[in-house]
Amino acid sequence: MKGQETNNSAIRTVITIVILALATLFSLAIEAFGVRIENIVLVYTVALIIIIAEMKSPFYGLFSTVVITLLYSFLFLDPKYDIKLQDLNSYVSLFSFLIVEIVVNTLIYRMQQQSKRSDRNERQMKSLFEFSQGLLAVTGKEIVAYGEKSVEELTSRKLLFCDEYGVPMQPLKEEDDFIDLASIAHEYAWCIKNGKTCGYKENRFPDLTVKILPMTGSDGVCFGAILVDCSDGNVSKDDYAFLLTLTSQLTLALDKERALKASFRGAPATEN
């Protein structure tokens, strides 16, 4: 996997250099025909846009901006083929060129990030809808099994559902060894008592490698908690918000199941 990433980076670097080389050769060619220097700025700007759009990485945009600025100064500003500029106008021209390239780089990168965010939100909304539909088809202990499997697939995080006493709601699997329940008994009890999220990067017990998300019913009683593995340390705000939405849906489903069981227990016996 690491070797593949290295190969991809090498390929992107080669493509970036080729695009810069072609833009430079084209600029030299049109300059030979007496084209004004402002058009050369446009050629390099187009090359930068292509690089940012294709590479989809701020590193290549920044790298290209620096290289383009150096090439522009060395090849097209007087005195040519010298790193020293001739007069104030040359410095102003170079500075203006650099600002233009930086602005283009920043704007396109922001547009790409916004597009990625929109695509991710669309996928998450679709996943949330399918997840909610799936919850309607399960009852009892199936809710926990379905919830663990689905949320783990959607968020790539291990989960563990426990009742108010810290006992797993279903038999432990091999992959559930991401946390020793006995070692966090105090923290878990605090979460159940206060009905507040604690654990990884929260106000309470931030050094834990798990987040403890309380499951509070409509009656205000905390009937358990969901433990989320955060040992890899990569929990963005967007991912966390999606995770909370999924676990909230699960909490509602389990709470309805509790209420249904309570109504059956409280119902008068029927006479034969």
Image (tube, rainbow, N blue to C red):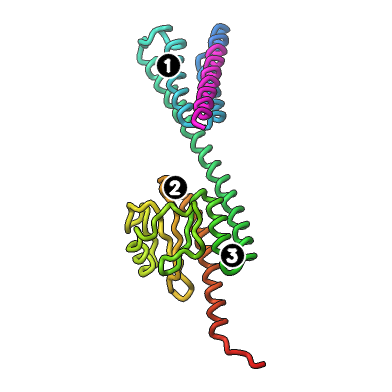
What is the distance, in whole Å, between disc 1 and disc 2 at their CAs? 37 Å
> How many numbered markers are drawn?
3
Front residue of 169/262: it is 169
What is the distance, in whole Å, between disc 2 and disc 3 at their CAs? 29 Å
Residue 40 on image: x %, y %: 52, 16
Q: Which portion, as a residue range, is magenta?
A: 1-27
Front residue of 174/179: it is 174
Report the residue marked by disc 2: 236
Q: In terms of secondary structure, where does tag 1 sit?
A: helix
Residue 104: tell me if it is visible.
no
* Position of 159 relative to 79 (above/below): below
- Residue 45 belongs to magenta span: no
User: Which label was assigned to residue 178?
Assistant: none
Q: In terms of secondary structure, where does tag 2 sit?
A: loop
User: Which label was assigned to residue 142?
Assistant: 3
Residue 244 on image: x %, y %: 48, 58
Please give the name of the residue rendered at 36% of the width and 60% of the height, measured from the top-left corner.
182
| Label 2 Cα neighbours within 10 Å, binned few <14 / some 14-19 / many ≥20 | few
Left or right: 115, with 222 as reference point: right
* Comes first in the chain, label 1 or label 3: 1
Q: Amino acid at mark 2?
A: Ser
Q: Amino acid at mark 1?
A: Leu
* Position of 103 relative to 26 (above/below): below
